[in-house]
Image (cartoon, grey):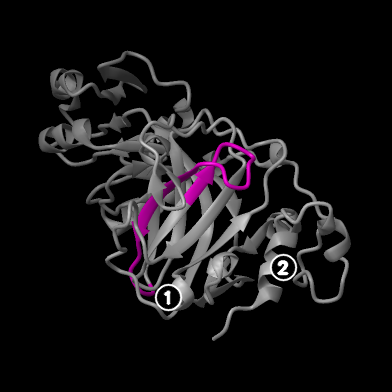
Amino acid sequence: MVWNPLRLLKTLIHFEVAGPLSRGLRNLPGMTNSGTAMTQALDANSLVPAPAKQVLWLPGAAVGDAEALAKSVASLGYSVTTESNSPLVNTPLVVWPGPEAGPMLEELGQRATYQEATLIDFRQPDPAIAALWGSLDDGVMGGVSASQVQWREGLRFVGEVSTANSGGFASIRTRNLEPPLNLGQWQGTVLSAQGDGQRYKWILRDSPGWDSLAYCRSFDTEADQLSTVRTPFLEMVATRRARTVPEASPLNPAQLYSMQLMLSKFEYDGELNPAFQASSFGLTVQSLGVYRQGPKPVIVLPGEHAAEFAQLLAAEGLAGVIRQGESFAVIGANDKLPSEVEPAVIRAIFEVFG
């Protein structure tokens, strides 16, 4: 492999950093990739997190009960799971039909909960989203690594990374978003990604400058395994060319200008990436979402003697719902249902576990 000046020129044109020459050069044959017309524009205001479907958790429930409840609450916008996942994501209600709720309540009082929403579904990309992404490899400094963006079952970051010519990184990056993306109401991002065993970097920038501070977080992948990569904004490290900048302010999620995925032989401050392999690579990102800490779930206790758990619920900061005649009552840490939980869902649960 040899250094390719044409790739460098294409990079400068795509990211509009070739100065006044960019507009003229990108109209030349072969200077832009098919399907990424520069005339397409994305209004970042259109990127609004879409709330995900709410989940009811039935730990240890019989298959028949789970199926009956799923059918009953589907029209109310809920799905049902019996899997013992940790943390709880978009799970406002936990149903405990068994007689012994004590140990479960203690566990739920400590379990992390999240609200998540989808920002971009890369499996069905808007053409303007696709047009944002382009390769940014070590060819900008004389290296020979080469990556590309593919759209197959998601955003595919593929290519070959080489350490020849003092190189050793490949990446894909978006052009700047105008206006910048405002995620100030969220605590971090969520990538649904399938990798190849390598360690990658997720990078955000809160300034429009081409060489502005890059806020990074490394994440590991397992070959052919779909993973959830949850990245807190406050834990992203300010860097410039893989050197940390300790005096920098934290990332400002209320004004995000660009996003980037990178495979590099370096971690930070000269340390090497322990999982790095100079070879072909592939990472598929199915979706980009956002998350924030969620409220503790409401515990539905349809069994007999459920009122006996009021004190334990309160001690764990939890609210519970029990039968009360033909209706129900809220006990424990609160005496009312949170606004996001509709009474119709509670009634549907009690009907199934009647």
State the image quarter where residue 345 is shown: top left
| Mark 1, residue position | 163
For the residue marked with disc 2, what is the amino acid?
Answer: Leu
Q: Is residue 29 above or below residue 75?
A: below
Which of the pair 91/260 is nearer the observer? Answer: 260
Label 2's element?
helix
Which mark is on residue 340? Answer: none
- Indicate whether residue 220 is drawn in magenta: yes
> Which residue is found at the position 57% from the left and 62% from the top?
172
Q: Is residue 309 above or below residue 42?
A: above
Q: Residue furthest top?
A: 335
Q: Is residue 35 above or below residue 98?
A: below
Residue 159 image point, x, y percent? 53, 76
Which mark is on residue 9? Answer: 2
Q: Dot 1 surroundings within 10 Å: few (below 14), some, or many (20 or more)?
A: some
Residue 170 image point, x, y percent? 51, 67
196 horizontally vs 253: left or right? left
Residue 113 visible in the snapshot? yes
Residue 73 image point, x, y percent? 47, 43
Label 1's element?
loop
Mark 1 to mark 2: distance in Å?
21 Å
235 horizontally vs 48: left or right? left
Residue 49 image point, x, y percent? 58, 40
Q: Dot 2 surroundings within 10 Å: few (below 14), some, or many (20 or more)?
A: some
Q: How many marks?
A: 2
For the residue marked with disc 1, what is the amino acid?
Answer: Thr
Which of the pair 313/65 is nearer the observer? Answer: 313
The residue range painted magenta reads 203-224
354 horizontally vs 76: left or right? left
39 horizontally vs 328: left or right? right
Residue 354 visible in the snapshot? no
> Which residue is found at the position 36% from the left and 23% from the top?
326
